[in-house]
Amino acid sequence: MKNLMDMAIKFLSWLLREIKKYKIASSVVIAFALVFLIVSILIGMPPIGYIVLTTFIAGPTLLYVYKNKDKSTTNTRLLLVFFAATVGTLIVIQAIPYGKNHTNPPINGEPAWSSPRTRELMVRACFGCHSNEVEYPSYASVAPISWMVQSHVDEGRSKVNYQEWNSGERGEDTIEVIQDGSMPPSFYTTFGRHPEAKLTQAEIAELIAGLKATPGFSEGD
Ligand code: HEC
């Protein structure tokens, strides 16, 4: 444990020295990392996305700096290595199967919707993650976006699936999450994506009334 701490401190002080040595390259890399971090948070990237990308890109870059620790290199060369590692990573991760399978499981029952309008609003705002009729946009085939989409759909379905109603699914929290605005998640509609899922106040009121009249959505149903 103490050894590990020593190693971490040694590594960090080495890293700081190198950052000071290559100020321009470090600034570009840090700016890049920040933009990536902010965009990823806004679109709901799962933690595994950060871990894989950081490891794959930082690994070769740091190795290059370490190998040149005595000779010292240039900012330009360092940036070239960083961008090569980034492009290489983006190509290599396309081979990871997670997130590639876009076949929907068979539908196994839906609630007895109080009206076609209630169903329509649910489809627009919720079926992108809580159904077996998920429509995958073309960008959902490109890693790491594909990992993000897959994790949202997997997690969403595991919480509630409005098309597995015959397997005992119930929607107790549905009205609550629509009312408090936590669903659909804000990341679903950032950057102009899924505008149809952004319900107006009037539509939300209509949907809640429709759900209250649908069995399975109120306490005690
Ligand atoms: C982008 C995909 C996505 C969309 C669209 C979406 N959800 Fe979710 N939903 C999730 C994820 C992921 C979770 C689990 C994480 C969480 O609770 O935030 C979840 C959780 C839930 C839960 C469980 C909440 C809890 O506290 O356990 C309910 C109920 C729910 N969603 C209903 C809805 C409804 C209703 C809509 C439409 C108005 C909707 N969701 C739209 C992804 C989505």
Image (cartoon, grey):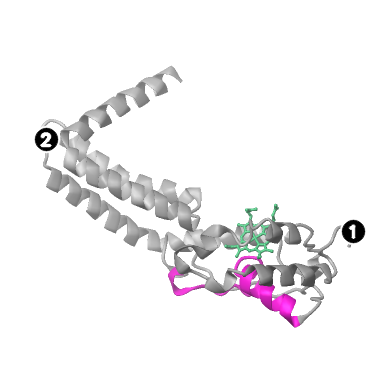
Q: In the displayed structure, does residue 73 sit left or right of residue 169?
A: left
Residue pointed to by mark 2:
72
Q: Is residue 13 above or below residue 178?
A: above
Which mark's residue is nearer the viewer, 2 or 1?
1
Q: In the displayed structure, does residue 77 sit left or right of residue 174?
A: left
Image quadrant assignment for residue 84:
bottom left
Which of these two is toward me, 43 or 205?
Answer: 205
Image spot of residue 129 (x, y percent): 61, 66
Q: Residue at x 61, y 62 (%)?
A: 184
Q: Is residue 78 above or below residue 86?
A: above
Image quadrant assignment for residue 217:
bottom right
Which of these two is toward me, 16 or 167?
Answer: 16
Q: Residue furthest bottom?
A: 116
Q: In the displayed structure, does residue 79 sit left or right of residue 48?
A: left
Disc 2 C-beta below 8 A from ligand 1: no
Q: Can residue 25 be seen in this view?
A: yes
| Type of amino acid at the residue the image marks with label 2 | Ser
Q: Please state the extent of the stretch shown in magenta in the rendering.
A: 116-139
Question: How far is mark 2 from mark 1, CA to CA?
Answer: 71 Å
Question: Of the numbered discs in the image, which one, if any, rests on residue 87?
Answer: none
Q: Residue at x 46, y 20 (%)?
A: 1
Label count reads: 2
- Of labels 2 and 1, earlier in sequence is 2
Which of these two is toward me, 49 or 59?
Answer: 49
Residue pointed to by mark 1:
220
